[in-house]
């Protein structure tokens, strides 16, 4: 009796393996970009009369969204979905943050599943990172702190977002970076640049995209219209002289009397 039961179990196992032996089971994790297109590639080729069934759900794939040779497609999915009849791959257009979840493909041949694959699209559907921009960092002029002729200060700025990092590079070397989990705050990254032959670039990136802007010494390091330090000093001295010695004459006529009002900023006199 025990021997017969053993052979019966073996026979059942062989039958199950014979039916399901060709079925592939696989789970792939994918990440999309908001507004872009993504294709869930099956890796299959040459599908002809097989039935193809795509299902979807945020937790479990239970809703049919695309089919071939199995009933009709759900009309609400037709505009954004494209099903390849030869490979079974599914293309989703104009991704939104609500498209995350489980996507499952079943290929059915002669009433048996011959291929099964699941795709998990993570909730982290990210928007492409914004383009950064560079501006000169304004510095106050002072005779006590002369301008540096061999350097300038710049700031790279980018709109913040989830997982966004802002970095400065000198050539291929990253020299500093910043990020902020508070996506409502703009990212700023200053840099003191030496006017030399090195190439500086600012890079904003997140896990799905990046944007780069190169620093132009001619464009971003000319805050004073080419005036050198000596000319600026002369201008400052001239303004100081005018401030301390400027006399403003105001002539007023009253009862045939001429009044001259003399202003020396600190002294006011009236002469009749």
Image: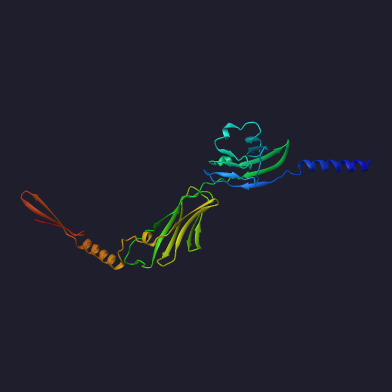
Residue 27, image x and y in percent? 67, 46
Q: Can residue 4 be seen in the rendering of this structure?
A: yes
| Count of marks placed on residues | 0
Residue 179, image x and y in percent? 51, 54
As drawn, which residue projects farthest toward the right?
1
Left or right of 246? Residue 126 is right
Closest to the observer: 148 or 33? 33
Q: Can residue 180 be seen in the rendering of this structure?
A: no
Residue 6, image x and y in percent? 89, 43
Closest to the observer: 227 or 45? 45
Q: Residue at x 57, y 38 (%)?
A: 81
Q: Quadrant of the N terminus?
A: top right
Closest to the observer: 19 or 228? 19
Q: Residue at x 70, y 42 (%)?
A: 115
Residue 265, image x and y in percent? 21, 58
Q: Residue at x 89, y 43 (%)?
A: 7
Tell me if residue 81 comes above or below residue 130 in the rendering: above
């Amino acid at each position: 009796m025990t021997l017969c039961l053993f052979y019966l179990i073996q026979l059942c196992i062989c039958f199950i393996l014979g039916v399901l032996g060709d079925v592939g089971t696989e789970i792939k994790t994918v990440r999309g970009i908001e507004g872009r297109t993504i294709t869930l590639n099956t890796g299959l080729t040459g599908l002809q009369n097989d039935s193809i069934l795509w299902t979807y759900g945020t937790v479990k794939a239970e809703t049919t969204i695309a089919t071939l040779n199995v009933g009709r497609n759900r009309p609400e999915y037709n505009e954004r979905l494209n099903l390849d009849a030869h490979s079974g791959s599914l293309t989703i257009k104009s991704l939104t943050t609500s498209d995350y979840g489980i996507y499952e493909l079943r290929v059915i041949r002669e009433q048996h599943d011959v291929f099964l694959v699941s795709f998990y699209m993570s909730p982290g559907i990210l928007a492409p990172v914004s383009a950064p921009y560079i501006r000169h960092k304004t510095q106050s002029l002072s005779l006590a702190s002369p301008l540096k002729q061999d350097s300038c200060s710049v700031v790279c700025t980018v709109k913040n977002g989830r997982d966004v990092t802002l970095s400065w590079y000198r050539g291929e070397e990253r020299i500093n970076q910043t990020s902020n989990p508070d996506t409502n705050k703009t990212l700023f990254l200053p840099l003191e640049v030496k006017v030399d032959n090195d190439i500086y670039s600012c890079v904003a990136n997140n896990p799905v995209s990046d944007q780069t802007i190169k620093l132009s010494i001619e464009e971003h390091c000319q805050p004073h219209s080419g005036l050198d330090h000596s000319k600026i000093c002369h201008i400052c001295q001239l303004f100081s002289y005018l401030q301390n010695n400027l006399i403003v004459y105001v002539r007023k006529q009253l009862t045939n009397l001429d009044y001259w009002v003399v202003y020396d900023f600190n002294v006011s006199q009236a002469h009749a």
